[in-house]
Image: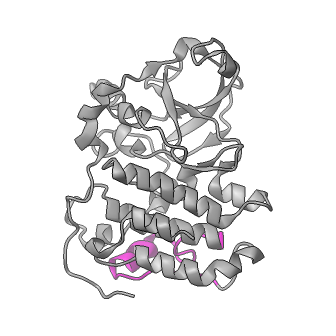
Amino acid sequence: MDTPSQSTPSSTHALSFENISVSSQEHQVIDLTAHLEEIDGNPFACGGYADLYKYRCCTSIFGPEIENAVFAVKTPRMKFAMGDRHKSIARMHRETGVWASLNHENVLKLHGLLYRSNNSLPSLVADYMEKGTVEQYLRCCPNANLVDVIRDAAKGLSHLHEREIAHGDVKGDNILVGGDGRARIADFGLSRMLGTDGLPVEVTTTDANRSHRWHAVEYFKFPTRIIGPTKPADVWSFGCTILQLFSGKWPFYDAIEAEVTIRLSQGELPKFPIIASRPDHEKYRPGIVAFCHLCWMKDPDFRPQMRMLEELAW
């Protein structure tokens, strides 16, 4: 649908969390350590940057109707050089204020921070999403509707972009579904909160490499340039995520990690598998193929904004 462009990514599309951190001063993040108790000492999920634990509210801080409610507590896995811990804590307090200030039905709600006794950084306290990731939801719930979750995710990401926030890591693992069946964008700015743009973080190598599959082509076409998160890059990743949800496969599912980097640097687009992940998804193939190719315009300036894609999401 497009031809390779020599133009470089625009730096004016969005501000990163680092750029808008001043606004977090307007929203104080609550320390919930004294108000939550751990349900199980074992994580119920593990990601590349952190482990997830279930906690229960043991006070009426959120009101009597939410007492005993279950929350997800995301605990970073970190290794520090001397002095780095204080920098990361300051950054987390600064950046989580931006997240906590957001209030949208398709954005995961961040309620505050919690200090686990065995961890040197504060953990993030968010709503517990019973249905798991959107990919798990589509796989395990026969009545789950692909178009509904695409529309929900588009609305959530569009809300971030309207607030001049670039997510930076859009993929199926970062879209969660609650008991109400509604999809919510999660974990935006997490890698920047945890200092992975300069401070040391213990990251699962395979997970970090795997995320490249969703990254925009400009990150690979201009390897000597430091390109921060942008709204157009999020749009590219959103297209990859839609492909993932439709097919049940990662972008470039037929390539090993090293080959993915080569293909992207050459401007190659992800392929659609012959068979969708579910038979009822096949009827959406023509619309999804067209939708994804809009997201994959190789010149980031030509990609549509999320507001437009939200309206196109059937």
- Number of labelled discs? 0
Q: Is residue 219 above or below residue 81?
A: below
The image shows residue 52 at horizontal and vertical percentages of 60, 36
Of the pair 25 and 48, the residue shown nearer to us:
25
Residue drawn at x 23%, y 43% as measured from the top left: 19
Q: Is residue 68 left or right of residue 251?
A: right
Q: Relative to 311, does residue 27 appear above or below in the rendering?
A: above
For the N terminus, the quadrant is bottom left
**Which quadrant holds the C terminus?**
bottom right
Q: Is residue 22 above or below residue 293?
A: above
Q: How far across and down, in percent of the image, does residue 168 sit?
A: 38, 54
Residue under the image location 48 percent in, 67 percent down: 311
Percent x, y for residue 111?
Answer: 51, 28
> 85 or 9, which lies in front?
9
Q: Quadrant of residue 178?
A: top right
The span shown in magenta is 247-273
Q: Is residue 144 left or right of residue 246?
A: right
Q: Main secondary structure of the magenta part?
A: loop
Give residue 118's position: percent from left, percent from top: 53, 20
Residue 180 quadrant: top right
Residue 187 inside the magenta-drawn segment: no
